Amino acid sequence: MTELIDRPTTSTPEWLLRAEPGLCPCGCIGKRHKGSFVEKTLRGGASVLRQVVFSDDTATRGGLLQRVDPRVKVLTMVGLLLAAGFVHSSLVLVGLYALTLAAAAASGLPLGFFVKRVWLFVPIFTGIVVLPATLSIVTAGHVVIPLWTWDGTVEGITSQGLATAARLVLRVAVSISIVVLVTLTTPWSRLLAGLRGLGVPKMFILVIGMAYRYLFHLLTVVMDMYEARKARTIGKQKHDKAARGFVAATAGVTIGKAHQLAEEVHQAMTARGFRGDAKTLDAPKLSLRDGVCLLTAAAIAFAALFVDGLLV
Amino acid sequence: MCKDLHYAYLDKFTALDGVSMHVARGERLALLGANGCGKSTLLKVLDGLIFPDRGTFHAFGQEVTEDALEDEQMSEAFRSRVGFVFQNSDAQVFSPTVREEIAFGPLQLGLGREEAAARVDDVLAMLGIADLADRAPFQLSGGQKKKVAIASVLVMNPEVLLFDEPTAALDPRTQMWLIELIEQLSGAGKTIVHATHDLDVLDRIADRCLVFGEDHRIVAGGTPGEVLGERALLLEVNLVHERTKLR
């Protein structure tokens, strides 16, 4: 065993051995400043990480959809997305949305979280498209909210425009709900295995899997660098040239580290016999439950299209 | 067997400067040296991951060169006989789940899927990490990642095991577990080569040591007892400080 003999080994500067008074010895509370965009972005990254861990937790619960094979889930997802895309009746879309809520509840997903996750994205995907569509200059019809007059004609929001907008919003909500249902009830690794089972090229899956895995690693590296800087920053953090320089330097260092890591990962793969054609474990066999799920989803899709045909 | 190996990164930063050595079957060899002296580079040469600028390396009666490893049969034989545990477990654990990570090696080397899956289960049970099988690597602690990295190599049942700084950054319990595992593998006849500057566990993990100087050459060799007795040498190669007390 080795140990250091208790004697000073370096010439320590005198000031380092002296206690330094704090910058605010009176202990008063100074001005508070909101975090910078860099901090907010990194916090966002950390929150994504927490959500992924949470998603993995929900995906491993013993609910209805968690027991279904990922290949079947991917197939039914595509089928139901197509059906939702072809449906024109808002009533049928409401029915489909209600079914996604029921499936979420049966799979043990917290409904509040599920609804929030879906409706957070709906305005992003539909907002820009839907708003102009409600106007009479885009969708002609009966003006219910007049906004201006053009050449003696009242222009504004039409009832037909509102109906189109509602249909589009509902369709997007149903589609996102279906995708969120699959992602929240399937662990990422099994989702990849499912895609592999459906014939997506192995190399494609390998690259996606590795990109996902190292995204978290590099995110941690960036957060560590930021925290190390923050720990040594006294006073208000300025958003000046130096701050921008830090962002650029962090990006540069991260790219360098990513490059080095990529080389090491390739060596680790080569060391275990990788020669360009990745071989992977087989996805598990399908069960009766998976067949029932597939048939139920097909029945829902056909029923939705049939009822839609009757209503429209 | 290595003869007069020279290697420089970017043709500029020397890592090996005329290194010659041999490793006998079933031997436990420790490569000792300070940071940056070339230990890890030598391990990568021994695993056929990088190739020397000058000098030769022979393994299992064949010269190992880039050209030779292009041969599918030679590559498969060599990769299945030599396993490498990297210092950076993050680089070694690259698959989406622990199970797929451990199965990677056997599958690349042509083992059937059922046999590979059975081996994975055996290794998971042996290392006591069966509960991690379906976990993602980013959910593992440093010690757990190291265990997965070791499992991913042991599952291939290689004759030669190369460990780069095996005990670095491990907590005492995991360190002891690893030392005991190395003793057990050595008892089973495996050839083990470590790169380390941890002198505390030397007598337990090595039969013979080679000491690297900071000039990237091998400056001495001997049993752990002999090397640890050469205080002047250890001081010169920066393995101990003048005030370090060896026990």
Image (tube, coloured by chain):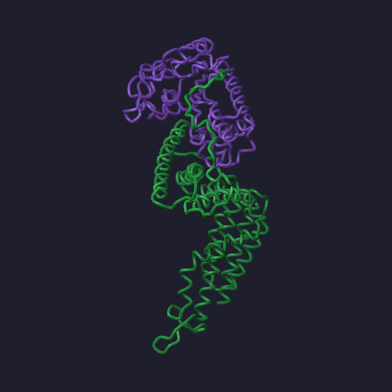
Chain colours: A green, B purple
Above or below, B14 against A110 in this view is above
Q: Residue at x 60, y 68 (%)?
A: A303
Residue furthest front as drawn: A26
Q: Quadrant of the C terminus of chain B?
A: top right
Q: Nearer the viewer, residue A169 or A277?
A: A169
Look at the picture and state if A215 lies above or below B233. Answer: below
Farthest left residue in view: B11
Q: Position of residue B167 (x, y in %)?
A: 55, 26
Corner quadrant of residue A179: bottom right
Query: How many marks are shown on the rendered structure?
Result: 0
Picture layout, residue A245 above or below residue A78: above
Question: In this view of the protein, can residue B56 be seen by the observer?
Answer: yes
Can residue B201 be seen from the camera position used here?
Answer: no
Where is residue B228? Give x, y as percent: 52, 13
Using the image as rendered, state which of residue A27 and residue B81 is in the foreground.
A27
Q: Position of residue B183 (x, y in %)?
A: 59, 19
Q: Is residue B59 left or right of residue B170?
A: left
Q: Residue A28's x, y, as percent?
A: 58, 50
Which residue corresponds to the image point at 50% horizontal and 17% vertical from the top-left?
A: B29
Q: Give the position of the N terminus of chain B as an image quadrant.
A: top left
